[in-house]
Image (cartoon, rainbow, N blue to C red):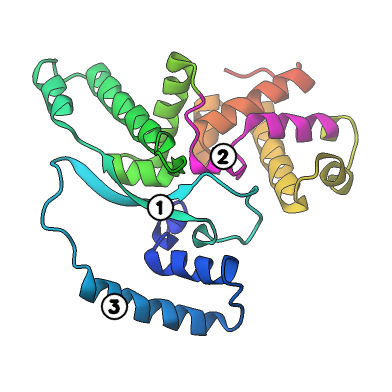
Amino acid sequence: MSQAYVGTAQRTFQQALIHLLESDYGLLGSRRILETLAEDVQKLVDQFYPAPQHLSSGWMVFTGTRASGGKTHPGQGAGDHELVTLAWPVLLPEDVEYLAHHPDTASVRQEWFRSRLVRLIEHGLQHPDGSVLLTLADLAAMLGLTTVQVSQLLAEARRLTNKPLPTKGYFFDQGMRPTHKEEVIALYEAGLDEAAIARQTQHAPESVGHYLRDYERVKLLLSHHTPLAQVGQLIDMQPGVIQAYAKMVSKYHPEISWS
């Protein structure tokens, strides 16, 4: 079972209520009691606020994460952040018009998905009460794509628009920010061990270990002349992350060539 969508599944009203009780009211105690209380409140909400009968065509009600708070730590669940439920512009009339007036080719579809992806991310960022973020898995589920496809589209969109277009993982530093990887790998290649790197960079030891293991896996495959396109298939890693590690391999080990 894929773990990519675990965080998306955890982002519920009940999780948001538990977070509110713990963070704003200091109500600490049995997690099971808090979960039971949240379930009862959910039943009351369903009873007194039934789902609306009308929503604009092409809009989807979906729960994202408020862009606030510190970096994510190992073991922290998706419901431990402030959650925000919005209507998102997933498929608008102009999207259908675009398809109607363009040939059904791969390049047209690529542009179609990319523009919708950018719109979704920017819609969350422009929320008047503060930016709301989505994960790669959220965007994949909303657009009917895989997380790998979304990652590739997002890399293209960032390059073409020169905008950061942050996802939840990017904002909360869940391992997708190349600058942190580069910092860790530079210290590693300078001879520091994991503990020293964690202290110097103020990263969690688990994150440092994760970066180093992924770096070594990519380096090992490239040293055996594995084509870069196949590396991700072998170790289940996003293309953008593989590219970042491959560039670092070239920087510190120029004797290892790749294509």
Mark linked to residue 44: 3
Residue 257 in the image: state x and y as whole percent.
67, 17
Residue occupying the point 75% across, 51% down: 204
Numbered mark located on residue 84 in the image: 1
User: Quarter of the image containing the C terminus?
Assistant: top right
Amino acid under label 3?
Leu
Amino acid marked by disc 2: Phe
Residue 171 vertical placement versus 159 (above, below) = below
- Examine the rendering and report whether any part of residue 2 can be seen: no
Query: Helix, strand or loop at disc 1?
Result: strand
Q: Residue at x 62, y 42 (%)?
A: 173
Residue named by callout 2 = 171
Q: In the rendered structure, are the residues bearing label 2 and label 3 in contact, judged by CB atoms less than 8 Å apart?
A: no
Which is more foreground, mark 2 or mark 3? 3
Horizontal relation, residue 18 to residue 149: left or right: right
Bounds of the magenta segment: 164-187
First along the sequence among labels 2 and 3: 3
| Residue 157 is one of the magenta-drawn residues | no
Identity, as a three-letter code, of the amino acid under mark 1: Val
